[in-house]
Amino acid sequence: MSLILLAVAPSMIIIIYIYFKDRFEKEPWTLLLKNFILGATVSVLLTLILGKLTTELLPLLDQNHLLDVFIKAFFVVGLVEEFSKYVVVRYIAQRNKEFDEPFDGIVYAVMVSMGFATLENILYVYSYGYETGVLRAFTAVPAHATFAVLMGYFMGKAKFSNRTYVFNLTGLLAATLFHGAYDFFLFIEFIPGIATGAFVFLLVGIFLSSKAIKLHQENSLHRE
């Protein structure tokens, strides 16, 4: 039970944080839960399928070669995982009538991402124990949330713009770039100390996510 709590708690804290940042019109909990579950099921399943296909199309020959690490980080992991989340936000959440202001893009993207991250975290914690759970609570889970906020910021703009495709794809690209960069530095195990770059990208992502949240709050369609 304690392992489950350790695995689930980081995502729940982030969900509550984003929920209360949605100041002017809260989203229905039933819809939030639906997107969370879709993130933990549909997005995960898509990731498994696309990950296998991508690995076959882009075989990684040498884990000690920067190009192979780049391909793995940005395409096999970053693009595949973010696209799998994007599909749910784009074709389920964004089309719902409750998605009625730009900030909702952040809310639903985070819900989908936290569903994905929660299942992933449970698997990691059960496989590797408490230390991994504590480490991921301050790294991987906040990273998933950060990528989601960046994606959701642009997808929120897309819903209320005549440049829908441009903003949607910009959101996918932003999340993929930060996810890929974060993993790229973590995957380079043959250069001592370079993993620090992942935390730099995480901090930059958190800063930009904070700005994105404030911008959508200030421009809320429900703000009086």
Image (cartoon, helix red, strand yellow):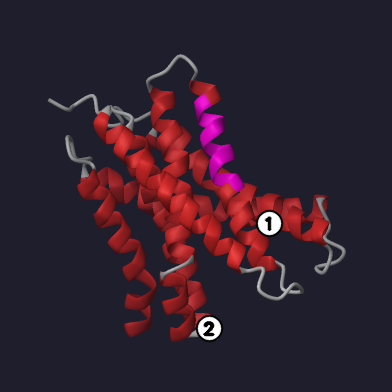
Badge 1 is on which residue?
73
Magenta segment, principal secondary structure?
helix
* Residue that appears at 44% across and 32% down: 155
- Which label number is shown at residue 157? none
Considering the numbered disc 1 on the image, is that residue within a helix, a strand or a loop? helix
Relative vertical location of residue 11 with respect to residue 177 in this rendering, above or below = below
- The x, y position of residue 4, in whole percent, is 36, 77
What stretch of residues is rendered in magenta? 167-177
Badge 2 is on which residue?
128
Judge left or right: residue 43 versus residue 214. right
- The x, y position of residue 212, in whole percent, is 38, 39
Relative vertical location of residue 142 with respect to residue 211 in this rendering, above or below = below
Judge by depth and name the residue closer to the eye, 96 or 21: 21
* Residue that appears at 66% across and 73% down: 193
Judge by depth and name the residue closer to the eye, 214 or 175: 214
Residue 176 inside the magenta-drawn segment: yes
- The x, y position of residue 150, in whole percent, is 46, 42
Residue 122 seen from this side? yes
Q: Residues within 10 Å of mark 1 (few under 14, many from 20)?
A: many
The quadrant of the image that shows the C terminus is top left
Q: How many marks?
A: 2
Judge by depth and name the residue closer to the eye, 212 or 123: 212
- The x, y position of residue 209, in whole percent, is 40, 46
